[in-house]
Amino acid sequence: ILNVEQSPQSLHVQEGDSTNFTCSFPSSNFYALHWYRWETAKSPEALFVMTLNGDEKKKGRISATLNTKEGYSYLYIKGSQPEDSATYLCASLSNFGNEKLTFGTGTRLTIIP
Amino acid sequence: SQTIHQWPATLVQPVGSPLSLECTVEGTSNPNLYWYRQAAGRGLQLLFYSVGIGQISSEVPQNLSASRPQDRQFILSSKKLLLSDSGFYLCAWSVRSGVKGQPQHFGDGTRLSIL
């Protein structure tokens, strides 16, 4: 994988259901993986920064896992609520010198009340 | 607390006109600063980043330039806009420290439409 890819592109989930989506990134020269939540009419907000293989991070009902060897990360949302509706972006950082993040195109999540 | 201000929120400009978008950060010193663009149907693309006053790195060849005249001020400019410059522009900052990959904090963005 040369680019950061996210799937699915969009997702509709019933309120109360749990869901997850995927971020694939280049596993070679990996340094860090970022997740951001971007609500409509707001600015992107950092959720997680993950660096270690096997790492799992949690923030309330949202959690993320990281597999650096195969180059993927999952974002999980448990018991979806309407306020979870947003576009979720992941971004990969390589271990070359600079701070350049390469973003995926995002997963647009809509929670149906 | 730290805040980032970006303006204007929307801008409609004719082809060939100049551009100046401004971004300022408050509540922190020596931040890394970034300009991103999101074209329709595409992910955020890094245009420029800066690790200090007068230090600008350009990530993609383009019709735009960036300047950092003060520590917490980042300006995106163009002398003559093209239709392809249309898009949503985001400014961001991160803590400059010995730890790479700090989370980035974004402004509210500027929607630029070129006619």
Image: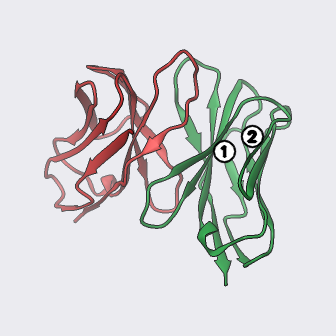
Chain colours: A green, B red
Callout 2–callout 1 Cβ contact below 8 Å: yes
Quarter holding the C terminus of chain A is bottom right
Residue B70 shown left or right of residue B89 in the figure? left
Q: Nearer the viewer, residue B114 or B37?
A: B37
Residue tagged 1: A4
Quarter holding the N terminus of chain A is top right
Q: Position of residue A104 (x, y in %)?
A: 61, 49
Q: Which mark is residue B83?
A: none
Q: Nearer the viewer, residue A52 or B13?
A: A52
Q: Position of residue A72 (x, y in %)?
A: 79, 43
Q: Secondary structure at mark 2?
A: loop
Q: Position of residue A46 (x, y in %)?
A: 56, 46
Q: Nearer the viewer, residue A90 or A45?
A: A45
Q: Which mark is residue A1?
A: 2
Vertical comparison of B101 with A85: above or below: above
Chain label for disc 1: A
Q: Tell me the kind of residue under disc 2.
A: Ile
Residue A66 shown left or right of residue B75 in the figure? right
Query: Which of the 4 quarters of the picture holds residue B52?
Result: top left
Chain label for disc 2: A
Residue B27 shown left or right of residue A53 in the figure? left
Q: Circle 1: is it few (<14), some (14-19), or many (20+) Cα within 10 Å?
A: many
Q: Tell me the kind of residue under disc 1.
A: Val
